[in-house]
Image: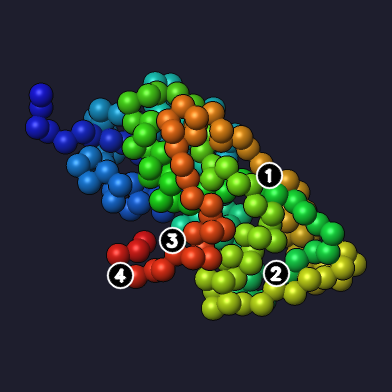
């Protein structure tokens, strides 16, 4: 058996911020750009799966990843909350699938030797309101006001209002069942995790 570390190529067209989480989860693996033993493709956008660079790679669709340096919808929400431009909309209960970057790293470790295309979520599909409240908790307990529809049209940007009014859910149960994957709820993580010098 070789003592050389496994060479892992991570392709992340929209999720580069997960790399430190993967390095922490897999300290004995060498992350490389070329000449890899295994390629893992990670994307938040399901439409990107058709562009994965290697058909034999592990391909993980991880919608709406939350973590340090996050992008996409969670970051758009966080920026609006921080600037005071985010509101709950009365009567809206749209949901989105999420997963924390720590669990993306665990998913990589679990699927490393099982090429295929998988969807990875926290299996909770929180409402936008719940996720926004959890993000606000991390942003110095910012208060989020609730508006009726007409006021939301006047005060929220159209793109943000449409986003939080539209379901964006995906089924991650197959991956969880196959790999005995037990993710943490993103909302619970944000509300309860104690960040310290070791946290990302």
Q: Residue at x 58, y 77 (%)?
A: 141
Q: From the viewer's perspective, is the residue at label 4 or at label 3 nearer?
A: 4
For residue 42, side relative to residue 163 (left or right): left
* Front label number (2 vs 4): 4
Q: Is residue 83 left or right of residue 108?
A: right
Q: Are marks 1 and 3 in contact (CB under 8 Å)?
A: no
Spatial CA span between label 1 and label 3: 22 Å
N-term mark: 1 or 4: 1
Residue bearing mark 1: 168
Q: Position of residue 123 (x, y in %)?
A: 57, 42
Residue 180 visible in the snapshot? yes
Check disc 1 and report its element: helix, strand or loop.
loop
Q: Nearer the viewer, residue 2 or 176?
A: 176
x, y percent for residue 28: 19, 42
Label 1 or label 4, whichever lies nearer to me, is: 4
Q: Secondary structure at mark 4?
A: loop
Q: Earlier in the sequence, mark 2 or mark 4?
A: 2
Q: Residue at left 50%, top 30%?
A: 177
41 vs 161, left or right, is left
Identify the image quadrant of residue 73: bottom right
Q: Tags 2 and 4 in contact by the CB under 8 Å rule?
A: no
Q: Which mark is residue 197?
A: 4
Label 3 element class: loop
What is the secondary structure assignment of the residue under circle 2?
loop
Mark 1, Cα crowd under 10 Å, few <14 / some 14-19 / many 20+, is: some
Residue 86 numbered mark, or none: 2
Task: Decide which of tag 2 and tag 1 comes sooner along the chain.
Answer: 2
The disc at residue 68 is 3
Q: Disc 1 to disc 4, how far (Cα)? A: 33 Å
Q: Position of residue 130 (x, y in %)?
A: 66, 60
């Amino acid at each position: 058996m070789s003592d050389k570390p496994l060479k892992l190529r991570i392709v992340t067209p929209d999720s580069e911020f997960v790399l430190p989480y993967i390095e922490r989860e897999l300290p004995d693996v060498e992350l490389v750009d070329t000449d890899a033993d295994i390629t893992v493709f990670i994307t938040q956008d399901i439409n990107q799966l058709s562009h994965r660079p290697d058909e034999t790679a592990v391909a993980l669709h991880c919608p709406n990843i939350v973590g340090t340096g996050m992008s996409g919808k969670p970051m758009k929400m966080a920026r609006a909350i921080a600037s005071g431009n985010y509101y709950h909309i009365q009567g809206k209960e749209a949901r989105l699938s999420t997963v924390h970057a720590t669990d993306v790293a665990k998913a990589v470790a679990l699927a490393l030797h099982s090429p295929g295309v998988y969807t990875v979520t926290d299996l909770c599909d929180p409402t936008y309101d719940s996720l926004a409240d959890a993000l606000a908790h991390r942003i110095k307990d910012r208060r989020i006001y609730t508006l009726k529809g007409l006021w939301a049209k006047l005060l929220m940007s159209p793109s943000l209002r449409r986003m939080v009014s539209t379901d964006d859910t995906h089924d991650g149960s197959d991956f969880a069942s196959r790999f005995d994957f037990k993710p943490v709820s993103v909302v619970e993580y944000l509300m309860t995790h104690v960040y310290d010098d070791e946290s990302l």
